[in-house]
Amino acid sequence: MGPGRSYARSRLLVVYLLLVAIPTLLGLVVLGSTLLGLSRLTELRAVSCGDRTTWPRVSIISPACNEERHVAGAIESMLETDYPDLNVIAIDDRSTDRTGALLDGLAAQHPRLRVKHVMELPEGWLGKLNALQTGVTLADGEWLLFMDADAHLAPGALRRAITLAEERGLDCMSVVPEVAPAGLVGDAVFDVSLALMSLGGRLQNVSDPGSRHVAATGAFILVRRATFERTPGFEWLRLEVADDFGLALLIKTHGGRCDIFNGRGDVQLEWYASFTEMKRAMQKNCFAVVARFSPLRSVGLSMFSGWMALFPIAVLLDVPPAWHALTAVGALALTAASVTAAARTGRRIIPAFLWPLGFLGMAWMTLRAGIIGFRLGGIEWRGVVYPTSLLAQRQRVKV
């Protein structure tokens, strides 16, 4: 081999390492954190309630805005739970579809359901947070259970949750729900996102009082009312885009004990029917939470996600076969992480093997969010445009 060819081969190896080394390292880290994070989550369905006969009163608060597709089934699942001392407060947040009428119809049949219609949004509030605040003022439970209007509660789930929260002395507990299919790409995006959520010890450190890490999902957040009333309440979060993480942060920052569990089989979330619906609904989160209102950061994160999706094509480069082992290690690690996330949350496995589609979906969602955010100068949520200048300094959740 001549000097020129040797030099070209050396450059090719450098290019190969640049393409593969960082994604492979990140893949190994993601796999390790997924195993440590998701695998340690106690399954809610495994909790035994014993022969208990007395239960604290629980108020379920469920905000709904244009949820006519899901709201009836979700609220009925909450009302039909076997928990003995319960009331449900549904907040119709300025819906323009049949959500309000459906809720009123349910309230006429179920005395445990109270419906409140919010007609106007106070200045300086995000709609969902104002709806949650409205619900709290109407609630009388010792525990407050915040559930999205597309979340379903299985029989026995609330008994198990209360038992677990009291046994462990928790003030705030959430679950990773079982999420309904969202199409091939949507499912791949969810599996990758769930695996990435474990990075940095987020999941395993939620219960550590000395850690600022929190994790929660809007499908199910159970909060001890006495602890909530020692905090500034939703006023502290009124412009927080990541409202679920924000509620957990509110409790933990003000001395409450928090944890997150596996809700597979007990809490189901209908969520989005397709990737198209997902990318539209998640625009605000991608721009505000992930990119922190920076179009430039949106572009950078999009490019990085694309890199993570496409690095396996490095096997096409003409390098010694042993070098391709590095690519294989990275690809296998990300496959294992994605499959673990799907398996642990009761999801179908096939989309998890298509994790490159998940990263490509994330790349497009993030880039699209940055473009729209730049054009709007902020985010649009429930028909209201919130400028970056109003929101940026009020985001307490950092990812």
Image (spheres, rainbow, N blue to C red):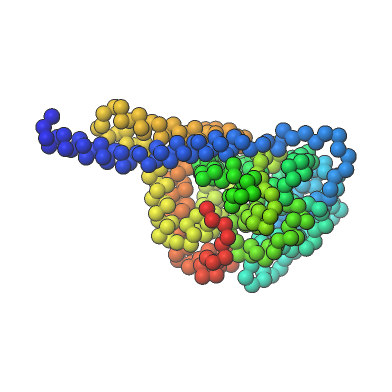
Q: Position of residue 263 (x, y in %)?
A: 67, 40
Q: Which residue lies furthest to the right in this view?
A: 53
Q: Can residue 388 be seen in this view?
A: yes
From the viewer's perspective, is 251 left or right of 387?
right
Q: In this view, does 209 lie to the left or right of 62?
A: left
Residue projecting furthest to the top: 321
Instruction: Examine the rendered structure and indicate whether residue 17 appears above or below residue 249.
Output: above
Residue extending farthest to the bottom is 123
Q: Nearer the viewer, residue 67 or 259?
A: 259
Q: Is residue 381 above or below residue 18?
A: below
Q: Is residue 369 visible?
A: no
User: Could you tell me which residue is drawn at 49 percent across and 32 percent down?
Assistant: 336
Q: Quadrant of residue 119?
A: bottom right
Left or right of 60 on screen, residue 337: left
Vertical comparison of 351 with 193: above or below: above
**Residue 169 drawn at (x, y percent):** 74, 45
Expressed as whole percent of the image width and height from the top left, the position of residue 363 reads 44, 49
Counting labels gives 0
Q: Which residue lies furthest to the left in this view?
A: 2
Residue found at x 49% / y 36%: 31
Query: Which residue is painted at 64% across and 72% down in the image?
Result: 123
Residue 234 drawn at (x, y percent): 68, 62
Quadrant in the picture for residue 243: bottom right
289 relative to 340, above or below? below
> Image quarter for residue 321?
top left
Residue at image position (40%, 31%) is 329
Which image quarter holds the N terminus?
A: top left
The answer to which of 126 and 118 lies nearer the viewer is 126
User: Is residue 30 found left or right of 54 in the rendered image?
Assistant: left
